[in-house]
Image (cartoon, rainbow, N blue to C red):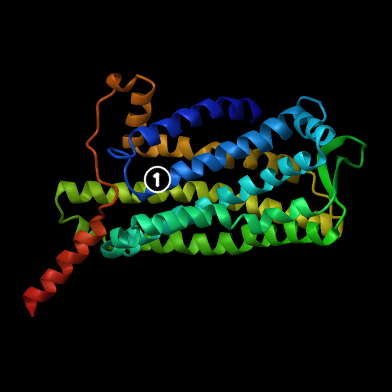
Amino acid sequence: MLPFTAISIPIYVIFVCALIKYRKSELSGAFYTLHISIAVADLLSLIFCKLFYKFPVFCGIFPLGYDVAMRYSYFFGKLIMFMFWYSMHVQICGVVVVTINRFTALVFPLKHNKIWSKRFLGLMIIGMWLLPLAFSVLVLTTKMELKASLNSDGELRWYSFDYEDERVETIIFGVSGIWIGIVLNVTLFVMYLIQFIKFAQNRAALRKSNVAAKTKAYTELKLALCGFVVFLVLSVLGLIFLRMIAENLFNDYCRVCIPLYSVFGDINAWITPYVLLVISSQTRHCFLNTIGLGRFIKKTEVVPLTSSVGGTLELRKNSQHSGRS
């Protein structure tokens, strides 16, 4: 996955440029504004988790970026480790915020635009960057050492961090594992399930709607599917993380955990732009325009992402009831 991860960094940078360039036109709305913030977190994760740590390890070199940082300044070395954890948790909070955005769009369509005001959007983004501090700042309070982890055959499995204060290690790994592997897995899955059920309930009324209403409805569904795919990757990563915690607590060795965690950790860092480019024609057109290839594809009709056919259908039902009464 490392070569694909390396290729994904410039693609992600172009993706961010497209989001910023078209934020007031085709890619306007809270959904895409949130993805600008998520993109920053993903790029930070690619820098601190991959360039400083993972690339040197898989090239057979001691984690060079971390090693040099520790030799130059012990605090700077810990700061890199802090960013390792912090960027990961910001990514996770980003998935949560997008889920909330899609939930309100499909379940509460009439109130969605009112809920996602500029103030509320700003508060969600601030919370997305502040909440992870609670999971990450403890890294700066204890001494730690980077150690090689070997399997039963004496072969290198991974480099792990040994924390002097075991309470800090328990909090960082234990709370993070429960938060990602259990709480978020259950909560976000239920939220997406409710969204899809709501859309299915509206399908009967949707068949009687005009083309514009149908287009808007399936645009909302596509965006929800986009968020759901990203959530599935995070869900698998959380379950693997829980298994790794069990390994540390009960000395129950798992041969496949590290490779799987490595693969899904990579995918989690760069999957967002690919999912949006595949599912959303608007995103794809703006991306190609940014690199000068937009003229080679047919421009699709821009559908306002802040609108929702659910609201249209709900209004229609209300008007029908009013007519009967």
The location of residue 71, given as percent across then percent down, is 84, 33
What's the residue at 45%, 53% (across, down)? Answer: 98
Q: Quadrant of residue 155?
A: top right
Type of the residue with mark 1? Thr
- The vertical placement of 236 against 189, above or below, is above
Q: Quadrant of the C terminus?
A: bottom left
Judged left or right of residue 185, residue 65 is right
Disc 1 element: helix
The location of residue 270, given as percent across then percent down, is 55, 36
Residue 289 visible in the shown view: yes
Judged left or right of residue 152, residue 310 is left
What's the residue at 31%, 36% (across, down)? Answer: 282
What's the residue at 39%, 21% (across, down)? Answer: 291
Q: Depth check: give the residue in front, 135 or 137.
A: 137
Q: Depth check: give the residue in front, 196 or 158.
A: 158
Q: Quadrant of the N terminus?
A: top right
Residue 244 visible in the shown view: no
- The vertical placement of 179 against 82, above or below, is below
The location of residue 125, given as percent across then percent down, is 47, 52
Q: Label 1 crowding class (10 Å Cα cut-off): few <14, some 14-19, many 20+? A: some
The location of residue 83, given as percent across then percent down, is 67, 44
Q: Quadrant of residue 49?
A: top right
According to the picture, the residue beneath numbered tag 1 turns out to be: 33
Q: Quadrant of residue 106?
A: bottom left
Q: How many marks?
A: 1
